[in-house]
Image: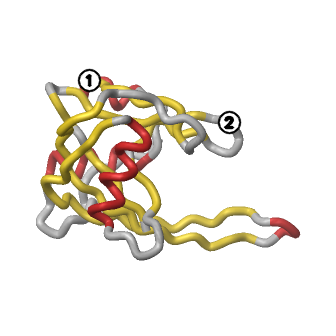
């Protein structure tokens, strides 16, 4: 379980640059995994501050995205992973933009909305944008155009 924020201000979207285990880097929504017993609302506030330096207020629940992936494991086995990602719209209420140190991201930045599609990004960015733009009553991106990159 994880919680993420779509923060859009003045035509720009706040993103964090995720560093994969192999060293590759792609932009993602700020957010991340819930601590045991933590409320997702509190998770998104904590994670956005950790990754961007900003204090945020979640203003709307946009939806829930479910992913399932298989990952190779030792000895030729695979791990069957399922994740639930809760996506909020959030408003910056304070703090200053800064980069995370010692975490899963190495940079935070505002990107013009019309340039996000050109970034090296994870699919969650497209999911968040689709939810933010379309605001489906079901809170699902099913049926919405969500290109993977």
Marks 2/1 in contact by CB < 8 Å: the verdict is no
The residue located at (34%, 45%) in the rendering is 126
What is the total number of numbered labels drawn onto the structure image? 2
Please give the name of the residue rendered at 23% of the width and 27% of the height, measured from the top-left corner.
12
Q: Residues within 10 Å of mark 2 (few under 14, many from 20)?
A: few
Image side of residue 140 versus residue 83, left or right: left
In the picture, measured across the screen, residue 90 lies left or right of residue 22, that is left
State whether residue 60 appears in this view: yes
Q: Residue at x 14, y 25 (%)?
A: 10
Assess disc 1: are there few (<14), some (14-19) or many (≥20) residues with their C-alpha within 10 Å of its C-alpha: some
Q: Which corner quadrant of the image does residue 98 belong to?
A: top left
Front residue of 55 and 143: 55
- Which label belongs to residue 23? 2
- Is residue 35 positioned above or below 130 on the image? below
Q: Residue furthest front?
A: 95
Mark 2 element type: loop
In the rendered image of this protein, does residue 141 appear above or below residue 146?
below
User: Residue 112, which numbered label?
Assistant: 1
Q: Which quarter of the rendering shows the N terminus?
A: bottom left
Q: Position of residue 129 (x, y in %)?
A: 26, 44
Q: Is residue 10 left or right of residue 44?
A: left
Location of residue 19 by image quarter: top right
- At a point 73% along the width and 70% down the height, the residue shown is 78
Q: Of 127 and 91, which appears nearest the observer?
A: 91
Residue extending furthest toward the bottom: 37
Residue 122 x, y percent position in the rendering:
46, 44
- What separation in Å lies between label 2 and label 1 (alpha carbons)? 25 Å
Q: Earlier in the sequence, mark 2 or mark 1?
A: 2
Q: Does residue 58 appear left or right of residue 127 in this picture?
A: left
Residue 3, position as x, y percentages in the image = 36, 59
């Amino acid at each position: 379980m994880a919680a993420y924020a779509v923060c859009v201000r003045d035509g720009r979207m706040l993103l964090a640059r995720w560093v994969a285990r192999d060293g590759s880097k792609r932009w993602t929504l700020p957010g991340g995994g819930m601590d045991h017993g933590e409320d997702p609302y509190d998770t998104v506030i904590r994670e956005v501050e950790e990754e961007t330096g900003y204090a945020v207020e979640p203003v709307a629940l946009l939806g829930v995205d479910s992913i399932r992936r298989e990952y190779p494991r030792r000895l030729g086995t695979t791990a069957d992973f399922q994740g639930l990602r809760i996506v909020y719209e959030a408003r910056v209420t304070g703090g200053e933009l800064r980069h995370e140190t010692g975490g899963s991201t190495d940079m935070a930045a505002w990107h013009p909305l019309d340039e996000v599609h050109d970034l090296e990004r994870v699919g969650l960015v497209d999911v968040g944008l689709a939810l933010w733009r379309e605001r489906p009553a079901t809170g699902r991106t099913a049926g919405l155009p969500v290109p993977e990159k």
